[in-house]
Image (cartoon, coloured by chain):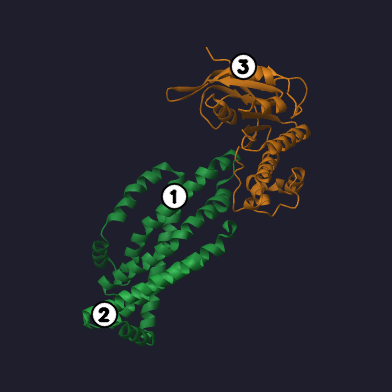
Amino acid sequence: MILRGVTKKYGETVALNAIDLALEEGKIAAVLGESGAGKSTLLGVLAGTLPFEGEREGGGRVSYLFQDPKLLPNLTVEGNLRFVLPKPMWGGIGGMLARVGLAGKEKRLPRSLSGGERQRVAIARAFLYPHETLLMDEPFSSLDLALKHSLVGLVASLWRERGETIVFVTHDVHEAAVLAHRVIVLKRGEIAADLSAEGDPPRDFFARPPLEDDLIRILAQPKP
Amino acid sequence: MKKNLIFSILAVLALWLVWVVAYFIVRNDYILPSFWETFRAMGRLLGEPSFWSAFGFTFLRTFAAFFAALALAAVLSALACLFGGVRAFLAPVVSTLRTVPTMAVILILLLWTSHGVAPVIVSLLVLFPALYAAMLASLDGVREEYGGMARAFKVGAGRRALWMYFPLAAPAVLGQAGSILSMGLKITVSGEVLAQTYRSLGGMMQDAQIRLDLPSLLALTVVVVLVGFLLEGACLLAERAIVRWRT
């Protein structure tokens, strides 16, 4: 997916300012930044759900993983997946639910699941939905550390099996450094840094990943 | 739950006590009949086939108005939720319907329609704004919460309506349906009184008033109140039975 000269304004406020970005196919990119840096706006532009000035090219079909699982409370776990999937794909639901650790919970309603299980359903939905690019909007931000570790590992292993392009926004430096090939740092609507790490993710969640110190330094620098 | 039931029973007993005390203060059967006299009048009414015929027709009129208003509100609130233009167009119409005097509408309708139809239409016109507002608020809530997700996954309109909008908007609407239906009964009976509708509870009330038969008039009023309670209770049970995923 390629963005050329993408600018997005909300009235007088510039959310994104002339962004040029080329995302590598089959890799995981993190968009890191503080609140109001333009992360979610960039995700909206990548998704094609926001109007903007500039050009956007490629990316194919897009799937989503939201911060809140957004499961319909009236539908079972299986029903929630059926809701978004084309009928011919319903056969793959059982396998995917087993893959994310929800075997035997197909007929349960969301209210009877834990927060982590609900996010697993959302992960199953995001990976099963036909797509070439997966966009994730702060998918682990509301989870405790143990759950975050487990779900980061799950997303990374599903990516290894499938190899789609993943873009996720986060304000968590550690999460970005563990899960991404490349970290794009946004500050006030502009790309402040674009760093890549060697090797495939995930990196050791309980160690200090190579990019983390650099990213903290960049985020701490005041913008001139 | 048990505590609430006790308080509800206490409230009914308090109302009954107010009636008994008022009767002993007024001491005039032509102004306020006694509870027992009213109770006897109700017994007499319940034994008359004409009462059940009137009751049935009033019930039918109320339900006809309610379901017509429900269907109209469902279609128009869905359109208003989808299209801003429809919402803006309907806003002044609904406001006008909400504020227009009911009696004036009945009088006009009596010139245009029959005595049996006028109460149905007036009830429909009163119920529609309430149902429309309840449905639109519910649909807006569902869209706010889940609309973005459904759009992101490009879920078709039919599937969205069937699996998302209708079932998720239903609890709020069903929660208010009881009070709206009982309001419908009240409006229908008022319409029948003014229209002097043949075979109707309102018509029987009008008849009792002309004959200064206050016990029968009060007995009919108590019947309407009790039926209103029963309708509210039935809607509450229906909500619990239909919306199982919430409990």
Give the quadrant of residue A58. Answer: top right
Quarter of the image where the C terminus of chain B is located: bottom right
Q: How far is disc 1 from disc 2 in space, using C-alphas?
A: 45 Å
Residue hosting label 1: B137
Q: Chain of mark 1?
A: B
Instruction: Determine if residue A101 is in view.
Output: yes
Q: In the rendered image of this protein, which colour is used for chain B?
A: green
Front residue of A223/B161: it is A223
Q: Residue at x 38, y 57 (%)?
A: B130
- Mark nearest the camera among 2 and 3 is 2
- Looking at the rendered image, the disc whose residue lies closer to the viewer, 1 or 2, is 2
Residue with the mark numbered 3: A218
Relative vertical location of residue A66 with respect to residue A27 in this rendering, above or below: below
Rate crowding at label 2 as few (under 14), some (14 to 19) or many (20 or more) other CA atoms within 10 Å: some
Q: Are marks 2 and 3 in contact (CB under 8 Å)?
A: no
Tell me the SS state at disc 3.
helix
Q: Which mark is residue B23?
A: 2
